[in-house]
Image (cartoon, rainbow, N blue to C red):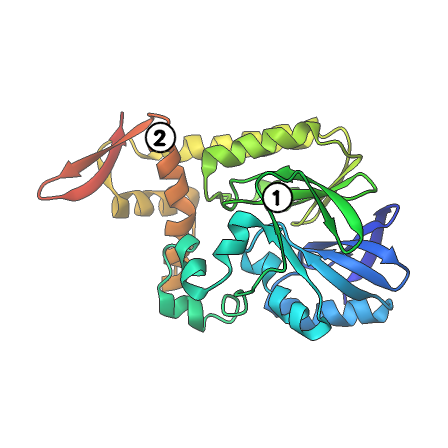
Amino acid sequence: MMDVRIIQGNTGYLEGRQLIGLYLTDPRHCILLDCGSALIRDELEASLSAVGLTPIGVFVTHVHFDHFGNAAYLQKKYGIPVALAFGEAELCRTYPAIKSHLFVYSAGEVMADPLLQSLPCNVDRVLMPSEDELYFCGVRFRIIRTPGHSPEHISVITPDRVCYAGDALLYDRSLTEAKLPYAYNFRQSLESIEKLRTAPCDWMLIAHRGVVPAPFDALIEENLAVMQRQLDSVAAIIDRQMDREEIFRAVRETMHIRVDTPRKAENLERFLRPYLECLVDDGTLRLTLRGTGTLCYEPA
């Protein structure tokens, strides 16, 4: 069971493997801010039932399986709307769209994976690029656009001045123990982290287990430092012309990343590629060819 914790006013969260935000619209109803993965579906429903809460809407920061995995299920079971930013709404419409940003998985893997096969969803309320607030289920939420971790990740500020940052920030062990913190667009992720420094709120609620009061400077600096340090570490590993397999092998050995299944190997590629793309884009690395056409990276 997940405990319900109130942060301020009507804003709180369900405390489990991750923190799922919620906003109480009255003593018996709530809007969920993210909804967890299919793995915690029974736990989520039982926890809400135990405290007498029924969801009336689901407002999601991004479409990763651990944040969006129950959206279509809740939408159908309770007849409630799902809200999502425009770019993310396009990513969850079909299996091919989901595969497009989970680029290392085959179409068959996406359709067969129990954590991914629950993602397709027709979103009821799409947050358009021009909107900086959303009136949803009778509540007005402010929006901070924090892309990077995913293509159009958003952070949501409730009327109680609590910002639910989803995965735009990490906290505590999720931050300090992350060997390759994931970012779909690494440089954009750093910009979004900096943007949250001045978020107009009193509290920052972070999905991977953090509730932090303002000011947020220390939290922001730690996130930026860890991300930049890991980017520099990858750059330091590539000290000569290296192809991807050579880079993957060096990263595994240097960072002590255990890869003992094909899925873990795929995930290492998915996590590492944005680092390489960022280092090419900022001029630290350059792309070259070896021999008859092997793509390589080398210091610029």
**Residue 166: which disc?**
none
Q: Which element type, helix, strand or loop, lies under badge 2?
A: helix
Q: Give left or right: position of 142 versus 52.
A: left
Q: Tell me the crowding category of disc 1: few under 14, some 14 to 19, or many 20 or more residues within 10 angstroms, Cα based.
A: many
For residue 196, what is the image quadrant? top right
Tag 1 residue? 154
- Above/below status of 225 relative to 87: above
Q: Residue at image x 81%, y 42%?
A: 159
Question: Front-most of 139 and 234?
Answer: 139
Image quadrant containing the N terminus: bottom right
**Residue 63 percent across, percent down from the top left:** 55, 55
Q: Tell me the crowding category of disc 2: few under 14, some 14 to 19, or many 20 or more residues within 10 angstroms, Cα based.
A: few
Question: How many angstroms separate mark 1 from mark 2 (CA)?
Answer: 24 Å
Q: Give left or right: position of 189 versus 108.
A: right
Amino acid at dot 1: Ile
Q: Nearer the viewer, mark 1 or mark 2?
A: 1
Image quadrant containing the C terminus: top left
**Residue 41 percent across, percent down from the top left:** 66, 70
**Residue 281: which disc?**
2
**Residue 75 percent across, percent down from the top left:** 66, 68
**Residue 290 percent across, percent down from the top left:** 14, 39
Q: Residue at image x 67%, y 40%?
A: 143
- Above/below status of 1 relative to 195: below
Amino acid at dot 2: Asp
Q: Give left or right: position of 180 versus 144.
A: left
Question: Front-most of 72 and 191?
Answer: 72
